[in-house]
Image (tube, rainbow, N blue to C red):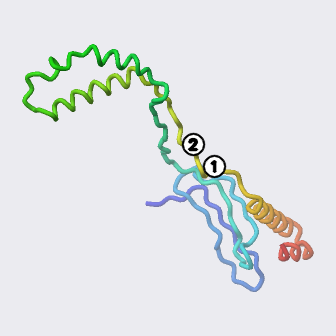
């Protein structure tokens, strides 16, 4: 079942056309849509551009990573702890051979790594390439679009043909 909340509709105000509801925004939850605004038509269309805020529920994964700072590790202390281990006693009597020896060595080094090498937490947003500033060309386009929208709103408010002609030229 679909229940409409926060609905908005507007009939087009174009001469010589049968009125019908074309511009429609609806949601199935209260407060999912806010700040509905009718903008200028897109291009030479008679359909208005509708802008609104859509409040969605998404979980954004935190992209935080921990990395070891190997250049700041205390390798002298690691070496002295490795020297204290009686390796013959550690691996003697095991029939698994090389695989067991390698696993034992790897576990010891991993423990020492966590003990003697510091870690730092990094956020993925720090080096986000998408966070770059806008170029001058894209700023000019945004400025032109905003100007066109303002002219359209002024034309709807006043009905002045000169404003409409300026809107068409922009």
Residue 131: give its label.
1
| Picture layout, residue 22 above or below residue 98 | below
- The residue at which mark 2 appears reads as 125
Q: Which quadrant of the figure has residue 93?
A: top left
For disc 2, the neighbor class at 10 Å (few under 14, some 14 to 19, many from 20) is: few
152 vs 70, left or right, is right
Q: Earlier in the sequence, mark 1 or mark 2?
A: 2
Secondary structure beneath dot 1 equals: helix
Q: CA distance from mark 1 to mark 2?
A: 8 Å
For disc 1, the neighbor class at 10 Å (few under 14, some 14 to 19, many from 20) is: few
Residue visible at 11% across and 21% down in the picture? 92
11 vs 65, left or right, is right
Where does residue 141 sit, x and y in percent of width and height?
76, 64
60 vs 83, left or right, is right
Where does residue 90 sit, x and y in percent of width and height?
17, 20
Where does residue 58 sit, x and y in percent of width and height?
50, 48
| Picture layout, residue 69 above or below residue 58 | above
Residue visible at 43% across and 20% down in the picture? 74
Residue 123: give its label.
none
Residue visible at 66% across and 66% down in the picture? 9
Q: Count how many numbered circles sit on residues in the image.
A: 2
Q: Does the residue at mark 1 contact the one at mark 2 (Cβ under 8 Å)?
A: yes
Quadrant including the C terminus: bottom right
């Amino acid at each position: 079942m679909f229940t409409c909340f926060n609905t908005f509709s507007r009939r087009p105000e174009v001469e010589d056309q049968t009125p019908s509801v074309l511009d429609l925004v609806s949601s199935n939850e209260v407060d999912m849509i806010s700040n509905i605004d009718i903008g200028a038509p897109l291009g030479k269309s008679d359909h208005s551009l509708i802008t609104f805020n859509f409040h969605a529920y998404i979980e954004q994964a935190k992209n935080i990573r921990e990395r070891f700072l190997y250049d700041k590790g205390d390798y002298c202390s690691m070496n002295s702890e490795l020297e204290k281990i009686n390796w013959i006693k550690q691996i003697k009597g095991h029939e698994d051979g090389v695989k067991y020896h390698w696993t034992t060595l790897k576990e010891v080094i991993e423990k020492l790594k966590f003990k003697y090498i510091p870690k730092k937490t990094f956020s993925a947003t720090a080096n986000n390439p998408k966070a770059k500033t806008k170029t001058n060309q894209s700023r000019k386009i945004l400025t032109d679009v905003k100007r066109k929208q303002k002219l359209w709103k002024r034309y709807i408010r006043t009905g002045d043909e000169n404003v409409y002609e300026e809107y068409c030229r922009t």
